[in-house]
């Protein structure tokens, strides 16, 4: 069990940051997979406050192809920031269920607001097939779900950056990417220039998941109060995560995913978690959401023995 046994579930049903529809139903899919009751069985005091209001795409006129649905995403992430901050203020670990990965701008803004008020820093471990470190100038698609880590690291759109009083929200030297295998050229440059530690799938193949996670936890935990875990379900191989909008072959195996989460739990450093990009429209019998809930349970302390 985490140091704090009180959890607050916050839904973020946004698909505005992505091209493929359906990811707005991800939070519902995770709830259908019984994420709350299964955490209660582990001994947690779980409170589900429902969903952050998000605009419906059909009601919006797209105004900027370089950064799509910016006003609406700004508004919903601002509300998420406040909900995450309130959760920490009230002594509950925020577990944010997405939704596309643009939500992490709000997640991290709320977390850093709380910890910076206590003169504390956080580390971030970002499990993803993609680096999510594009800006409007480097993005090919203009989709904000490819930009959240960039904005957390202090580069990108001024309006999204203004969501946080602290800029950058997180320190590149305490931020770790795991499982990446599909990058744009601008992202490769950003990773090198910012100094973010990135473990590609080749690194995992060569070093093994145990060594990768030991180093990732060391980087993210050094000099920080704790670690925010951002879990994009497409970090997993499509053979175990069919229900994602941007699948990339050659991802984490089922056991590699569990080991990563088990080691994160054992570190005793998890302070918050968000789960992104579950798309039940592309899934079979909610299997991807069920797998994602199993990963959440491992991160929150479920073991084999």
Image (tube, rainbow, N blue to C red):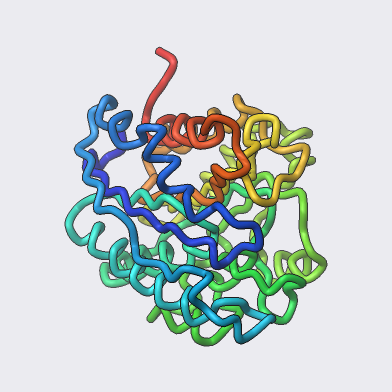
- Can you see residue 221? no
Q: Residue at x 50, y 80 (%)?
A: 160
Q: Where is residue 273 in the image (x, y as percent from the top left)?
A: 41, 49
- Can you see residue 154? yes
Q: Position of residue 19 (x, y in %)?
A: 65, 62
Q: Residue at x 47, y 63 (%)?
A: 103
Image quarter in which the C terminus is found: top left
> Furthest residue to the top?
305
Q: In this view, does 200 lie above or below 72?
A: above
- Compare residues 292 and 267 and report the one nearer the observer: 292
Image quarter in which the N terminus is found: top left
> Furthest residue to the front?
58
Q: In this view, does 161 lie above or below 91?
A: below
Q: How many labels does the image show?
A: 0
Q: Which residue is drawn at 17% across and 57% down?
A: 90
Q: Position of residue 156 (x, y in %)?
A: 61, 80
Q: Position of residue 265 (x, y in %)?
A: 41, 35
Task: Tell me: 48 left or right of 30.
Answer: left
Q: Residue at x 37, y 74 (%)?
A: 78
- Compare residues 67 and 88 and report the one nearer the observer: 67
- Compare residues 22 and 246 and report the one nearer the observer: 22
Task: Tell me: 279 left or right of 266.
Answer: right
């Amino acid at each position: 069990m985490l140091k704090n046994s009180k959890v607050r579930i916050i839904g973020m049903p946004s698909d505005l940051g992505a091209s493929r529809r359906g990811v707005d139903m991800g939070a519902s899919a995770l709830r259908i997979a019984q994420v709350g009751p299964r955490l209660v069985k582990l001994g947690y005091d779980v409170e589900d406050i429902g969903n952050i209001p998000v605009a419906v795409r059909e009601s919006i006129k797209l105004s900027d192809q370089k950064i799509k649905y910016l006003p609406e995403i700004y508004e919903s992430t601002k509300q998420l920031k406040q909900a995450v901050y309130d959760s920490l203020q009230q002594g509950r670990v925020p577990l944010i269920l997405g939704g596309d990965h643009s939500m992490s701008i709000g997640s991290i803004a709320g977390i850093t607001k709380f910890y910076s008020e206590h003169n504390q820093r956080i580390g971030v471990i970002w499990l993803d097939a993609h680096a999510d470190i594009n800006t409007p100038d480097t993005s090919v698609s203009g989709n904000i779900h490819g930009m959240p880590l960039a904005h957390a690291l202090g580069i990108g759109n001024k309006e999204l950056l203004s969501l946080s009083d602290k800029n950058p929200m997180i320190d590149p030297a305490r931020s770790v990417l795991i499982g990446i295998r599909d990058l744009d050229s601008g992202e490769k440059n950003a990773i090198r220039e910012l100094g973010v530690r990135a473990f590609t799938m080749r690194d995992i193949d060569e070093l093994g998941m145990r060594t990768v996670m030991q180093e990732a936890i060391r980087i993210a935990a050094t000099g920080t109060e704790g670690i925010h875990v951002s879990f994009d379900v497409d970090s997993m191989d499509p053979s175990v995560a069919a229900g994602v909008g941007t699948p990339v072959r050659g991802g984490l195996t089922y056991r590699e995913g569990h080991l990563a989460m088990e080691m994160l739990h054992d570190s005793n450093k998890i302070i918050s978690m968000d789960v992104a990009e579950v798309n039940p429209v592309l899934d079979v019998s909610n299997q991807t959401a069920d797998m994602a809930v199993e990963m959440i349970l491992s991160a929150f302390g479920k073991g084999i023995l």
